[in-house]
Amino acid sequence: MASDGHDGSEEKKFILPEIKFDKLFINGEFVDALSGKKFDTIDPRTGDVLARVAEGDKEDVDLAVKAAREAFDHGRWPRMPGTARRKIMLKFADLIDQHTEELSSLEAADGGKLFSGLKFMEIPFCGEILRYFAGAADKIHGETLKMSRELHGYTLKEPIGVVGHIIPWNFPSTLFFFKVAPALAAGCTMVVKPAEQSPLTALYYAHLAKEAGIPDGVINVITGFGPTAGAALSSHMDVDKISFTGSTEVGRLIMEAAAKSNLKPVSLELGGKSPIIIFDDADPNIAVQLAKLAVFTNKGEVCVAASRVYIQEGIYEEFVKKAVESAKSLKIGDPFDPEVNHGPQVDKRQFERVLSYIDLGKKEGATLLTGGRQWGEKGYYIEPTVFTDVKEDMTIAQEEIFGPVMSLMKFKTVEEVIEKANKTKYGLAAGIVTKDLNIANRVSRSVRAGIVWINCYFAYDCDCPYGGYKMSGFGKDLGLESLEGYLQTKSVITPIYNSPWL
Ligand code: NAD
């Protein structure tokens, strides 16, 4: 690990593509925010301004919802056959493949994410998500009902209507498609509010969607802030559903806004404090690699980050030693450098927040084994950090840090670790590392989490529903179950013979 700050080399120069990043995307056009206001999105490698972005507010949300409403009530998208929607979505996916390089550059510069990870995994995954749901677009159907009287009954699966998607900054592209792809397949129209920290790629996708043939008004993008643009969307009387990914605190506000407006349904993908549980029989080298992946991927800015690492006492000492070595082996630096595997936190606020949790960890008595400091003098880099002697009631064991901080905790028995693993308000994900099938089965059934990875971590798949238990939210992204979230069921009944009902 280079630990002495920047080596003097310049950050990769980055030229923004020809998209109008200082505009909103409403009804198929790039337009100015009505107020004319703009805000800066920052390059976290340097803290410098990357682009000026339109600051959408309530009046702009009103226009975007109006366009989406018109496209839903009178437009082609919800009415065209699923085969036609599928064709256009497949073209959209192909366009993403053709623009992987630009999209990866944008996202790396806007969010401090690794360029190679974006280019070879995240952006291609977006195309795959679109293809998965494109394949479902022509297979949406209801059921014929077995009525108890002489009635013919069947159900129709209809698109839910105008959807508001509110997205966080840590996976701006993949989370955009977790939401937009099933909504498109269902025949919905939508308004997307990307996070203010990482708004650029959403505008790029809106532009590609138009090029693919998605009709105007179906996808609208409003850049802006949460308490203004986001709140206007979640409380809008003409929005039929909100699909939200973000913090538990804001999830609560979204639910309140939905309840106080038109009682729209919401799906909430919220925060986490996920455990990874390593048993004595695990290969320590594999276990450490998995823990490193589970904690430090995307500089720890991952909702399912395993920020609580439980290690059984038999391999605890060996694991701790190896975990420190593995944290030190991460190369920090410009996320455009293919050798680098640890970039900067997304912005100054997040950088300061993570450092304040590290301070709290030290104050509350955890032992800092490595890291814990800013790396370099510019930008928002934090060294991969490992704490040991972490106790359940410490803040770093309870609150979501959303940064590169590994907390190591020892346990003796299976019963004990199940109880400890469940002892937070969250229930997003869990990891288990063991060769013992009985233990794996028992723990996976006992941990209250929406996804459990056994001897792997971050194993996402388009067909695998993903979402939280407890205060990590409800509703699913991915899988056919998520498509259901954008549909509603209508029952239709008619007499079989000339009506005895009249
Ligand atoms: P955040 O909740 O602060 O913001 C998320 C989005 O909500 C942003 O677009 C923001 O502008 C908007 N927003 C903020 N206030 C709002 C309001 N009053 N009304 C409507 N919208 C509002 O979250 P963040 O800091 O961007 O992201 C980090 C959080 O997201 C973490 O808690 C993380 O665990 C969570 N997350 C969860 C998942 C998941 O799938 N469960 C995935 C990624 C991130």
Image (tube, helix red, strand yellow):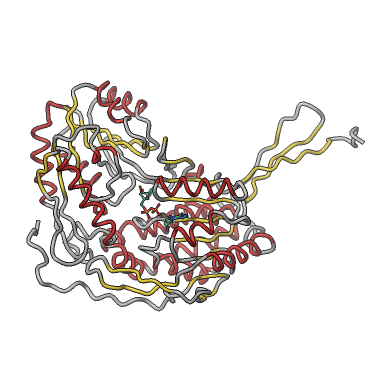
Image quadrant in which you'd find residue 205: bottom left
User: Between residues 44 and 104, which one lies in front from this camera angle?
Assistant: 44
User: Between residues 320 and 150, which one lies in front from this camera angle?
Assistant: 320
Q: Is residue 429 visible?
A: yes
Please indicate whether residue 18 sits to the left or right of residue 430 in the image.
Answer: right
> Up-down: is 327 above or below 320?
below
Task: Check the picture and name the quadrant holding the N terminus.
Answer: bottom left
Give percent across and percent down for residue 326: 12, 46
Q: Residue at x 26, y 65 (%)?
A: 44
Q: Name, please, the residue furthest toward the right.
A: 502
Q: Residue at x 80, y 33 (%)?
A: 151
Task: Check the picture and name the quadrant holding the C terminus.
Answer: top right
Image quadrant in which you'd find residue 239: bottom right
> Up-down: is 302 above or below 472?
below
Q: Is residue 478 visible?
A: no
> Up-down: is 79 above or below 447?
below
Image quadrant in which you'd find residue 185: bottom right
Give percent across and percent down for residue 433: 23, 33
Q: Residue at x 29, y 60 (%)?
A: 346
Q: How many marks?
A: 0
